[in-house]
Image (spheres, rainbow, N blue to C red):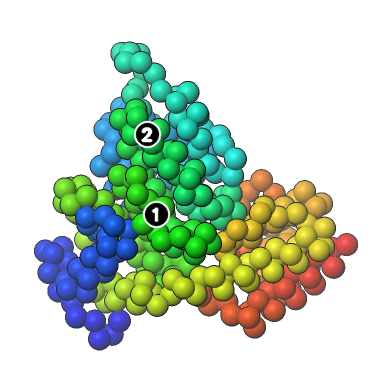
Amino acid sequence: MADAEVGDDVMGEDPTVRRLEERTAALLEKEAALFVPSGTMANQIALSLLADPGTEVIVHEDAHILNYEGGAASALWGITLRTVSGDRGRVHPDVIRSHLRSPDPHVAPVRAVAVENTHNRAGGAVWSPEDLDAVFATAKQHALDVHVDGARLWNAAAAGGHDPARLVGGAATVSVCFSKGLGAPVGSAVVSTAARIDRARFVRKRLGGGMRQAGIIAAGALHALEHHRERLAEDHRRAARLGEVFREHGVATLPVESNLVIAEIAAAGRDPDAFVRALGERGVLAGSVGRGRVRLVTHLDVDDTGLRTAVDAVRAVLGAAT
């Protein structure tokens, strides 16, 4: 990163940023990509490309776009997020069809569907290619676009043993993150057609996302993209072990399919906030994520020694509470 070749990215002159964008687009077999500071900005730029003010985008009720982005879809773009339910964050084609309506001046038209893979609040749930294909086909049949919130798309690909492009083939827009499982310090990207990315560059500027000599951070993202995708399987292995420890102590978890472990702490008769504090006192950071649940994440900075620390801390806290 310190040695990165840089230029003014707002003017399209940063060679390191350009290499990152070209590599990201190539991996997903899309025409172009745009480097942005955050996943939230990536998602919101994508929504702005797919839906107009006064229209709707179908999302799962637990979607990051709905729950963790500050109401941006309505505040920035005048878009209504039409929420639906579904097993572990998935949006079923039948549910999509049930929310489509004939043209009527009383109702807002649906313009797009957003899916999240892996799904954060569902415990890192991984979409199968077949389920995604069904959503893509349904959307196409009804002239809808699909956005894939792929903040953890690299994890989804690693978990299923798929090429990442296989998971976004029918998507109009995709967001990907370089700073989660891949371990870069900062950065995400929006991926789409060249025409849409030209528009996205304007929207990024409007949102204050132009970063000038951004090659410094793009170099970290590019290194992570080239060197850290294969090792995601190690994070998944460690998360699976951590999930086993909770269950061994009578605490249920959501199915552990990738690098997230969400434990049902309140359902086991324990206070989630107190549990998080007790882990923190033992050097393990976790977060309370609502509904009486606590989330732990394995990532680049958690090796087997770190896993043992986490396992010992979970055992100690759960053992002390019994």
Identify the element where label 2 is drawn: helix
Residue depicted at 36% across the width and 57% down the height: 165
Up the image or down, 269 lies above or below 219; here it is above
Up the image or down, 174 lies above or below 114; here it is below
Label 2, label 1: how far apart the Cα atoms are: 17 Å
Q: How many marks?
A: 2
Residue 262 figure quarter: bottom right
Q: Which residue is mark 1?
A: 166
Left of 299 or right of it: where is 135?
left
* Front position among marks 2 and 1: 1
Q: Tell me, for residue 230, which label it has, or none.
A: none
Asked if one can make out residue 237 in the rendered structure from this viewpoint, the answer is yes
Near-viewer residue (199 or 282): 199
Residue 147: percent from left, percent from top? 36, 44
Q: Quadrant of the C terminus?
A: bottom right
Q: Tell me, for residue 139, which label it has, or none.
A: 2
Residue depicted at 32% across the width and 42% down the height: 47
Up the image or down, 188 lies above or below 126; here it is below
Left of 309 or right of it: where is 71?
left
CB-based contact (under 8 Å), mark 2 and mark 1: no
Dot 2, crowdedness within 10 Å: few (<14), some or many (≥20)?
Answer: many
User: Nearer the N terminus, badge 2 or badge 1?
Assistant: 2
Left of 153 or right of it: where is 285?
right
The amino acid type, in three-letter code, at marker 1 is: Arg
The amino acid type, in three-letter code, at marker 2 is: Ala
Residue 131: percent from left, percent from top? 49, 43
Residue 152: percent from left, percent from top? 46, 59
